[in-house]
């Protein structure tokens, strides 16, 4: 495994479709090679990764400088908690203020 990905979060994992010729030539008992494309992110960097799922190995890791990664689901959850807390604080201040 590439050491740069040791602490990475994976923003997306997409299957690459096999070549049409490989699918058309497939016969029962044969292994159809499968690959996946991943977007991995660390706090400082975004990587595009291609993995050979059949062989269980990483084919390539390319650092993408100046690229913003997609927003992760966990970030949406964090934002919901923060916004709910702020809304709760506002309601408390309004209820405590003299009229």
Image (cartoon, rainbow, N blue to C red):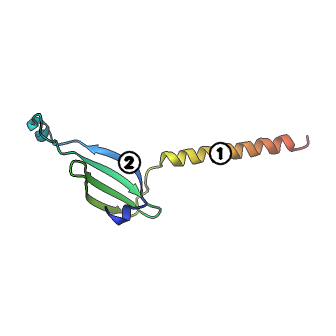
| Residue 11 in the image, given as x and y percentages of width and height | 41, 50
Q: Nearer the viewer, residue 89 or 35?
A: 35
| Residue 44 in the image, given as x and y percentages of width and height | 45, 64
Residue placed under numbered mark 1 in the picture: 83
Q: Quadrant of the N terminus?
A: bottom left
Relative to 82, say whether 28 is above or below: above
Residue placed under numbered mark 2 in the picture: 12
Q: Nearer the viewer, mark 1 or mark 2?
A: 2
Relative to 91, say whether 6 is above or below: below
Residue 27 location, quadrant: top left
Which residue reaches farthest right?
A: 98
Which residue reaches farthest front?
A: 29
Secondary structure of the residue carrying numbered label 2:
strand
Drawn side of residue 86 relative to residue 3, left or right: right
Q: Tell me, yes or no, whether the two marked residues, 1 and 2, touch with CB atoms within 8 Å.
A: no
Secondary structure of the residue carrying numbered label 1:
helix
Drawn side of residue 44 relative to residue 16, left or right: right
- Residue neighbourhood size for the residue with mark 2, other residues' Cα within 10 Å, grouped as few (<14), some (14–19), many (≥20): some
How far apart are the alpha carbons under marks 1 and 2?
A: 26 Å
Relative to 26, say whether 82 is above or below: below
Q: Report the residue at 30% width, 50% height from top.
A: 37
Q: Report the residue at 86% width, 43% height from top.
A: 96
- Which of the two discs, 1 and 2, labels the residue nearer the N terminus? 2
Q: Quadrant of the C terminus?
A: top right
| Residue 21 in the image, given as x and y percentages of width and height | 10, 40
- Residue neighbourhood size for the residue with mark 1, other residues' Cα within 10 Å, grouped as few (<14), some (14–19), many (≥20): few
Q: Nearer the viewer, residue 57 or 67?
A: 57
Residue 65 location, quadrant: bottom left
Which residue reaches farthest top?
A: 28
Q: Report the residue at 14% width, 37% height from top.
A: 23
């Amino acid at each position: 495994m590439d050491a740069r990905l040791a602490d990475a979060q994976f923003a997306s994992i997409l299957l690459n479709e096999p070549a049409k010729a490989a699918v058309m030539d497939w016969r029962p008992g044969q292994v159809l090679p499968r690959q996946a494309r991943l977007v991995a992110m660390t706090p400082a960097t975004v990587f595009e990764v291609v993995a050979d799922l059949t062989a269980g190995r990483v084919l390539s890791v390319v650092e993408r400088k100046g690229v913003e990664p997609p927003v992760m689901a966990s970030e949406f959850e964090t934002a919901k908690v923060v916004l709910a807390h702020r809304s709760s604080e506002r309601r408390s201040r309004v209820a405590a203020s003299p009229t």
